[in-house]
Amino acid sequence: MKTMKILTREQYFNRGRRFRKMETFFTGPMYALMKKQHASLRKEVVMETRFGKTRTVWYGFENKAPSPLLIDLHGGGFILGSPEMDEKMNIRWSQALGCRIISIDYPKAPDHPFPQAVDQIYAIAEHIWDNASAYGIDTARVGIAGHSAGANLAVVTCMQAKKAGKIHFLCQFLNCPPLDLATTAMEKPHPRGSIPRKMSFMFDYCYVNQADANDPYISPVYAEDRDLDGLPPALIIVAGRDSLHDEGVLFYNRLTENGVDARLLDYPDGLHCFMLKNNVAGRDAFEKATVFLQKYLGNNSR
């Protein structure tokens, strides 16, 4: 394996910022059109906690009756992404499940490294829980879903909720989660089609200080048994052509060993977050994820 030149922290930060600018340039027009097309199905709400203001996008709030809630956390390597990445999926889920969905545009590294996204996501979830009646949310049926970096944050939010003993998540859906940031991208498998090592390394380096990467709120695979016992039922999707495959399987095993009702969907030929693509495997994974969420959050789930 070729060695990689390690840059300074500031150099990685600058690269991360450039990536964000490029993302905005290339996705801005497409997302603007999407917002216009879905205007009647979405609502943007800026939520403020003690950690600052964060944009959220709400779906399925047309129905006034108390409804289940799914909190969505998009992917993007902790430095990229927005709720619009998941918009089509969230609209389909809100309609199919009859639930409300709040997608959080959480703070991004490198300008907002760990634990800023972790803190803000939990604070928003806590605010929603405390004001559930005003928002028409049935607190007996609240789930959380995440994709890639968002799946990491979803697990961590469940761990925080368990520790605090206040918010009760009924289920968690984890799509291609990065759960071991202590093992660098250069040390992980690199199957054909996976995210380039240099890019993955930059994502992680912008988000965390490597010396802290064993923290369970950064790398949940290192959580102690007592922190995993009692977590909500989980559906985990992993992809064989993804460098994150093995840590997803490891975390699934850790959950089941600690009595969590967990299910693993392993797609050997899948690429990272393939479920978001309109192909055979993506549609199959979406359908299975929908069945999982329907079990806990659907109108007939009581």
Image (cartoon, helix red, strand yellow):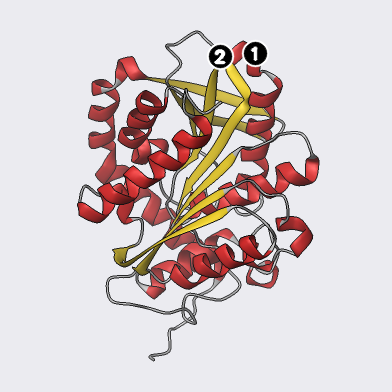
Q: Quadrant of the N terminus?
A: bottom left
Q: Residue 260's spot in the image, x, y percent?
A: 64, 54
Q: Residue 149's spot in the image, x, y percent?
A: 49, 54
**Residue 227 visible in this rendered orientation of the protein:** yes
Q: Residue 290's spot in the image, x, y percent?
A: 39, 39
- Which residue matches tag 1? 133
Q: Which quarter of the figure has residue 245?
A: bottom left
Residue 6 higher or lower than 159, as above or below: below
Q: Amino acid at mark 2?
A: Pro
> For the view shown, which residue lies furthest in the left direction?
279
Instruction: Left or right? Give the position of 159 relative to 21.
Output: right
Classify mark 1: residues with Cα within 10 Å, few (<14), some (14-19) or many (20+). Answer: few
Could you tell me how far apart the alpha carbons at marks 2 and 1 are, in whole angstroms? 8 Å
Residue drawn where x is 33% and y is 50% of the image: 285
- Kindly indicate whether the residue at mark 1 contacts the one at mark 2 (C-beta within 8 angstroms): yes
Instruction: Left or right? Give the position of 182 relative to 105.
Output: right
Q: Residue 63's spot in the image, x, y percent?
A: 45, 11
Q: Amino acid at mark 1?
A: Ser
- Which residue matches tag 2? 66
**Residue 109 visible in this rendered orientation of the protein:** no
Q: Which quarter of the figure has residue 281?
A: bottom left
Instruction: Left or right? Give the position of 36 relative to 211.
Output: left
> For the view shown, which residue lies furthest in the top direction?
64
